[in-house]
Image (cartoon, grey):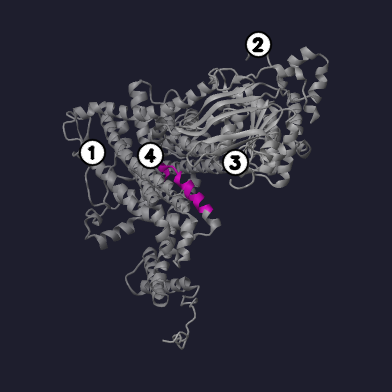
Amino acid sequence: MATLTRPPEDDAAPAEIEGSAVRRGDRVFRGLALYAGIGVLVVMGAIAVFLVWRSIPSLTSNSVNFFTYQEWFPDDNPPTFGIAALAFGTFMTAIIAMIIAVPIGIGAALFIAYYAPRRLAATMAFIMDVLAAVPSIIFGLWGLQFLMPNMFGLTEWMNDYLGFIPIFENTQGIYTKSIFIASVVLAIMILPTMSAITREVFTQVPQAHREAALALGATRWEMIRVAVFPFSRPGMISGAMLALGRALGETIAVALILSALFTINWHITEPGGNTFAANIALKWNESGPNGLSALVASGLVLFVITMVVNMTARWIIARRAEFSGANS
Amino acid sequence: MGSEGQAPVKLSVQSAVGAAAEGKVEAQRVHEVSAPSRAKRMDLNGVNIYYGKFLAVEGVNLPIEPRAVTAFIGPSGCGKSTVLRTLNRMHEVIPGAYVTGEVLLDGQDIYASNVDPVNVRRTVGMVFQRPNPFPTMSIYDNVIAGLKLEKGRRIRKSETDVVVERSLRGANLWNEVKDRLKAPGAGLSGGQQQRLCIARAIAVEPEVLLMDEPASALDPISTLAIEDLVHELKTEFTIVIVTHNMQQAARVSDTTAFYNLAGIGQPGKLIEYGPTQEIFSSPREKQTEDYISGRFG
Amino acid sequence: MSVTTRPTPPAEVRGVELTGKTLPRLAPLYSGLIAVAAALLLNVLTSVQGVAGTAVVAALLFVAIQSGWSFAVEGKRHAVDRLATTLIYATFVAAFAALVAILTVTVAKGVAALSPDFFTETMRNVSPRREGGGIAHALVGTLEQVLIAAAISVPVGIMTAVYLVEYGAGKRLSKSISFFVDVMTGIPSIIAGLFIYTFWVLTLGFERSGFAASLALTILMIPTVVRATEEMLRIVPNDLREASLALGIPKWKTILKIVIPTALGGIITGVMLAVARVAGETAPLLLTTFLSQNMNWNPFAGPQASLPTFVWDQIASGTNASLDRAWAGALVLILLVMILYLGARIVARFFAPKTS
């Protein structure tokens, strides 16, 4: 260490510590980060502002009730258009999709988390993730070209044997382009989302909880019921909400399958139905200025609905975060 | 900068400045001479340390002698690491944390409003409890990380080579890693990683070196290696070391400062300080004696 | 009562019963065979018809037989457990079958129209009824639009995440940014298109173009990039930040040269996944671009095609030739997404911290 010695004359030099308390580079960089973050807020605000602003002309010109009218003639004189049929179609397709996708998604997630062999589980989880990214146009094409012709049997059977329940009745004898088919396609689309989120919360269940249940002599299903479900319920709910948000806002797959009629028809296996998003895509290029404004107005309603759904989901997650934080 | 205006010379730029001053000695210097340490003294005057509203350490008055090892000892939570972190303004990295009182580096208050904390940290280096080499960098790049990232200065490879060798030799690591300088720093053993961190700290040529329990995560043999190193480094640097291990304090330090808590939720205090031998053989305070003899802590 | 006397133990001391009564290990197989046999029999004898019907009957019979057998031999708890296991396997098979069906059908139908020409030709002067034509113009459009979107959203997203993790901890502004980033994740893609149309086209007066589409995609990409980056920055150990600061490296350089490089693998992975997401978006493009059959290299002016809108257009034409092209385009789109996903995986592995 003798080599470390240094001539003594430098000892007199004072420490070089003066300078600006905050460096310019720091100020600039922090500013960039801050403005990027604020930019995100501004964009969110701008979306709301512009949708409201641009929908005002059509809403003020509308001669019928926007919320209860079913037809869509915004470019007529006087303009008559309403979202009743769109809202019906949107919620109907989303709810049926949820009824199908939630149990299957949870079951598939349970399978991957607790039943499948470890090695296989990772691969299947990856495949599920990839499928979550398959573009919706492909689901639409597949639904239109492959699923629809292969669903005649099921929908016919539903009419024959379950027809006494009004929604399964088919008075037209035509089984294509229906809300039911669109719902099945939507269900398959949101399955990976649903499954991926619930799988994640399942794998977060502390092993100690699960082992405690097993050590009490629980069967595997009892273990899931007493240790896994209570712990992951908020995660499952918020996963379902996020999937619902996706189903409500899905455009292309639905636009390809539905036959776009502006009527409320409870017979879900008959052709018909329309949704907010699909209607925007289908009417976009054939609308005049007032028509575009009317579509923006319907988009605003969709925006508000999905915001509410998403915020509820986030709120459930946030509440859960506090909850688990206090416990660990 | 003091009013003298005499630019202090740092080795990496020294080739230019130093050459003019010292002429032909230069060539030799780069290879033989190295750390241009000026080993400053530090003084703490009435230092109170806060985390938000919570007063963590109260009223510390302590001189830290240059070219000597000062050990901070005391029970867990007594604030010894907190005091250490105020010596290079690392304390304020935690949101809401601040310091009142004076911390002088050769008479200059490092908390004065015209002081750049970045410059303070270049002058007062630090080694942490757990070895933390940068995982994206090789051994070589780890050592020169501080030099390379400072002011974006372009340094010639021949210069960094010198710095790397000097620093690794200084940290007693050269012989173990000289054949694999391009290997990732994270691949070394724990003790080697810690010595790499010491090399990294001395490569920026600080004048004071702070060590926060540098051996607590290491095995006994690595610990001994670090202690030997501390012994050697004190010829060049002012060293402050926090340790849990009283034998270690006794072995490596010249001065010992004992901190203690008045009670739960109370701020920590500096109880006493003095030459290590005195503190260990005849402490003035009862609680120091109790702690040293193992009656608590 | 005598102290020493203890109650006489019962004559037969029962040992702890560990074995219990269980079904044979292959019970599910036996139940399955019986169920299939019974269903086939019903198929012959009764009105149960068709492959699907027989399969459903067989499945129901399997559940009934196994549950009944288990209930009789093992008791209620094990019967319920077996039923649950069966249902969970069934949901997985259903989910997987549906998803595999999408992939296989797309591959099978898409390969038919795929040829080297498909990648090099445009749809210029190709009438919907004719075969031939290609996606060169659409590939160029998608590539440009996605690259522009990435070029805007990656810096904004990363800097936003840097603010959230490195500067804004605990501040109200950072909490609200974080909240709205989450909300933004759930915005339907068509809303992004609507917004850009009202803002860029209606209000600022620009024309519909590839760039307008990029802006819509940017809105969809930013939240994904922010979330991925934020997550990765948060797992960078604080030790490294402190080590760097203690070396006298300014905070911004610490973030730029130490923190972000450490998290780089994860950030790149996140960006690639975000790109994969938006590369297939159709709805916002329909609103912000005009479809085109021709090559247009300029994203700032004129109609520009893209892969998703190409598929949409071909479906809308509805002829056999155009549907073939739609499937082929869909296959290319899926391959693109897959490549990005696999690439993201490889990147993640490549950048994983090296320890030896």
Q: Secondary structure at mark 1?
A: loop
Q: How many marks?
A: 4
Where residue A6 sits, quadrant-wise, is top right
Give percent across and percent down for residue B120. Answer: 61, 24
Residue found 37% across the figure and 24% down from its top: C200
Give percent across and percent down for residue A280. Answer: 31, 35
Quick one: quadrant of the N terminus of chain C? Answer: bottom left
Rounded to the nearest whole Å, what is the CA distance between mark 1 and mark 3? 83 Å
Residue C356, can we see it? no
Residues marked 1 and 2 touching at CB (< 8 Å):
no
Q: In the rendered image, which residue does mark 1 sit on? A: A83
Q: Nearer the viewer, residue C253 or C104?
A: C253
- In the picture, measured across the screen, residue A237 lies left or right of residue B258, that is left
Identity of the amino acid at label 2? Gly
Tell whether position A129 is magenta.
Answer: yes
Determine the chain carrying the residue at label 2. B
Q: In the rendered image, which residue does mark 4 sit on? A: C186
Rendered image: mark on residue B286: 3
Determine the chain carrying the residue at label 3. B
Rounded to the nearest whole Å, what is the CA distance between mark 4 and mark 2? 59 Å
Rendered image: mark on residue B5: 2
Q: Is residue C82 above or below residue A180?
A: below
Outermost residue, top direction? Answer: B4
Q: Nearer the viewer, residue A128 or B172?
A: B172
Residue found 44% across the figure and 57% down from its top: A110
Rounded to the nearest whole Å, what is the CA distance between mark 3 and mark 2? 49 Å
Q: Secondary structure at mark 2?
A: loop
Front of the two marks 1 and 3: 3
Rounded to the nearest whole Å, what is the CA distance between mark 4 and mark 3? 65 Å
Residues marked 4 and 2 touching at CB (< 8 Å):
no
Q: Which residues are magenta?
A: A122-138
- In the picture, measured across the screen, residue A30 lies left or right of residue C43, that is right
